[in-house]
Image (cartoon, rainbow, N blue to C red):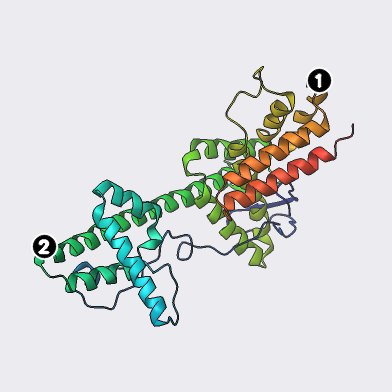
Amino acid sequence: MSLSSLTTGRFVAGGQCLGPARRARPSLALGGTSKASHMRLACYSKAARKSSVPHLRSRRLPPCASGKGFQTPQEELKKTAATDALIDSMLAMSVEDRRLRLTQNLMDFGTDFYLRCAARSDAAASEEEKQKFVQLASECMNITDAVIREAETKMDRSEQVLRDILTAAADPDSGEFEVPLSPAAVSRMDSVMNANRDSCGEEMLAYAFAYLRKLNEDKENEVDGMALIIQKVLQLFCKLTLATPEDPDAADRKPEERILDSVLRSDVSLWQEALSKRQELGASKESLVQALRARMEAVVLGDPSGSYTQKVHAEYLQEVEAYINKIQE
């Protein structure tokens, strides 16, 4: 099912089916995701090695990014040399530069990094040199813990925001959900999303896709309508993030750009109304398609590769293009 399509049904949050609903089959790839899987910025594994670095004996360590398996002695030497180079570069940095380097490349600081710090600490010729490696490992571990705690807090907030948006779709008095959603329900959802726009990003989309996959696997009819409402969440996300911040009526903008922004700022049900102004402003269908493809290239290339944001933006803009191509000149 495309992002711009909705079927009809009526249901309540408690699972009681109040009317027919067809099964939702979202067309977006439903990659598995959960709080316990790849949604975490980094998962921890225990280091079984005893070391002179106390933190390596008692704290969890992020996994090595290099993967596991048999390695030849030459490969082991090469990996150790690379780890030593990373350690030496970190020792030469200021505290702020270390923090920046670690937060931007967290997966470089896996188990191998900490165990190599321990080995070099054990082999140090002096107490002063020994403490350098101990302090570096401790500092990096503290930064890693802080980054992961912040990421988990952000993910928890994003999940709650998604729940709030879905809750806003229900009738305030009866608690029922009805699809197609009424303009009032869409407006409530839009208001919640705009009020929490800082939390409406990749994390929220990951939870939305997790819900879609669970609903798609569920065989109960009463959950079908919720999949349709999550589709509306994805539409509203695109509406929030795709239009340029400039005033769409600014005199110095091309007519096709103004119309395109008007479409992207509108609900799917209002696309026809937004496009009806194209002849008045002197924009042809071809110029609209060209403007849209330029926007698509800029947006999709600017999104993180393989992200949910990129997937949703790409499909939504493709549907806008398909809608424009149906216009009769």
- Looking at the figure, which quarter contains the C terminus? top right
Along the viewing direction, whichever of 38 and 228 lies nearer the viewer: 38
Along the viewing direction, whichever of 291 and 125 lies nearer the viewer: 125
- Looking at the figure, which quarter contains the N terminus? bottom right
Along the viewing direction, whichever of 109 and 40 lies nearer the viewer: 109
Name which residue type carries label 1.
Glu
Farthest right residue in view: 329
Q: Residue placed at 79% from the left, 41% from the top?
A: 323
**In the picture provided, is 148 more to the left or to the right than 205?**
left
Q: Position of residue 28 (x, y in %)?
A: 67, 56
Q: Position of residue 35 (x, y in %)?
A: 46, 61
How would you rate the neighbour count of disc 1 (Cα within 10 Å): few for under 14, some for 14-19, many for 20 or more?
Answer: few
**Distance between the Cα atoms at labels 2 and 1?**
77 Å
How would you rate the neighbour count of disc 2 (Cα within 10 Å): few for under 14, some for 14-19, many for 20 or more?
Answer: few
Q: Residue placed at 48% from the left, 60% from the top?
A: 39
Residue 128 is marked as: 2
Residue designated by label 1: 280
Residue 179 versus residue 70 in the image, above or below = above
Whether residue 81 is visible, yes or no, is yes
